[in-house]
Amino acid sequence: MAPVAGCAGPERSGAVLTSELPLPERFAVPLPRPALARPGPDGVYDLVQRVARPEIVPGARTEVWGYDGTFPGPTFDVRRGRPVRVRITNELPVPTATHLHGGVTPAEFDGYPTHLIVPEGLSHARLSHGGHETGWRLTDRTFTYEYPLDQPAATLWYHDHRMDFTGPQVYRGLAGLFLIRDEIEDALPLPRGDRELPLVICDRAFAADGSFRYPSVDPTLLHERGVTGAYHQGVLGDVILVNGAPWPTAEVARARYRLRILNASNARRYDLRLDPPPPTGPAFTQIGSDVGLLAAPRPLDRVLLASGERADVIVDFSTYPAGTPVVLRNARGQGSTVDVMRFVVGRTATDDSDVPSTLAPVEVLTRADAVTRRRFDFRLSGPGEHGRQWTVNGVPFDPETVVASPILGTTELWTITSDFHHPVHVHLGHFQVLSRNGRAPGPADAGWKDTVDVRPYEVVEILVRFTGFRGRYVMHCHNLEHEDMAMMANIDVS
């Protein structure tokens, strides 16, 4: 099959949307730290999805749709084994659904794409999605999600998951970090407090009035799904934001820092490097992947992240002379999207942190553990809104159709193939990458994961295990434009 039309090169995972206002100066604003989510007197976390207009680009106001009106949303910092209830009230002009990405969550609270929180004043009759008339679960205004948190320490995130409109709603701001901690992590001498930096990286384009520019077919996001023209490949912005700020700067001491990095972009992939690289030692020491710590640290000269993936890494800034500016760059970027952010190294500081040679117990799955084998092909097929549409095994998403029925507690071997860049995300199921094109996994494949970057015409094998709960979940491409245009499938865990 020929490459996707309009694909400019092997690293292009979408089409670039250009901002209409002058781009802001790079490294001119400090790195923000998202607010912490805090429970109310009843022990429930209350988040209100509402419109806000912060100043993202200096001199302009941008309408965001945010959890508590912030972009990104408040960071949850919670502990394993202590269940959390999150009450979400929707005051936006559209329905929403919230998914805890990487969570081991009961199906009714997983943010299934047709379980919608409908805002007050929006008639249910006005909702139309992909031509499907059945399978909807509509809740008026407020819904309480329950997260048991019976899973190891990890860097998770939460985001909108509304069927057919996930892309534009996440793009407008509906995403935030969700950190789980446990006793194993507590016992490690890792950097803490101010030396643990969350980095939510995404790209956006801005209209002339300062609003987010996004090529929706239906700007109201109430009726017709999809994007215009070549943007069905994926939407790439020309401004890189970290924690909601354009190309920010972080002042760091000459000490170790823990960076919890999330690729929250709709479609952009990152190859993160430090410029200059450290005078001695690795640029990064990876200690964790999508859903937990690694068994042992891994030295890396770069961090590769597709949409939805996370990396938990240590950077030792003590190897740089005081006063050194260190730029985090994206080797897959072009023009304005090469630079991500800047660190400025300060004076020597007391540092009692360390990276031990053993981090956490991690079971290693083998091919012999698989009780079932399945194959999933992620491909552009037809017909669809653009003449063709994104599909799984040649079929667009149907809420009533199931492609797999794994048994709770078992491990399956999945072979995933593709025709384009498809970061494949599995709800509930966590997995380990077994092979790429018959060879060993790559440097971005370590540990337990929930999202795997499947590149054009690649064959990737994963060993996926379903634990925790029975019910209906989904798997899908985490290029959000692909997901919205039907690249998703149901999994019934029995």
Image: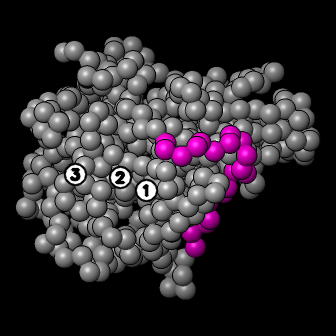
| Span shown in magenta | 19-38
Provide the secondary structure element on which disc 2 rests.
helix
Q: Residue at x 35, y 41 (%)?
A: 478
Front one among 101 and 81: 101
Along the polypeptide, which appears first: circle 2 or circle 3? 2
Mark 2 and mark 3: Cα distance apart in space = 10 Å
Residue 111 rendering spot, x and y as whole percentages = 31, 60
Q: Residue at x 30, y 23 (%)?
A: 6
Asked if labels 3 and 1 touch by Cβ distance under 8 angstroms, the answer is no
Marker count (numbered): 3
- Check disc 3 and report the residue beneath it: 225
Mark 2 and mark 1: Cα distance apart in space = 6 Å
Asked if labels 1 and 2 touch by Cβ distance under 8 angstroms, the answer is yes
Provide the secondary structure element on which disc 3 rests.
loop
Residue 319 rendering spot, x and y as whole percentages = 84, 29
| Quarter of the image with the N terminus in it | top left
Q: Quadrant of residue 376?
A: top left
Q: Which amino acid type is marked by label 2?
A: Pro
- Check disc 1 and report the residue beneath it: 172
Front one among 472 and 326: 326
Q: Residue at x 22, y 43 (%)?
A: 485
Residue 483 shows in the view: no
Neighbours of disc 2 within 10 Å: few (<14), some (14-19), many (20+): many
The numbered mark at residue 205 is none
Q: Which amino acid type is marked by label 3?
A: Arg
The numbered mark at residue 168 is 2
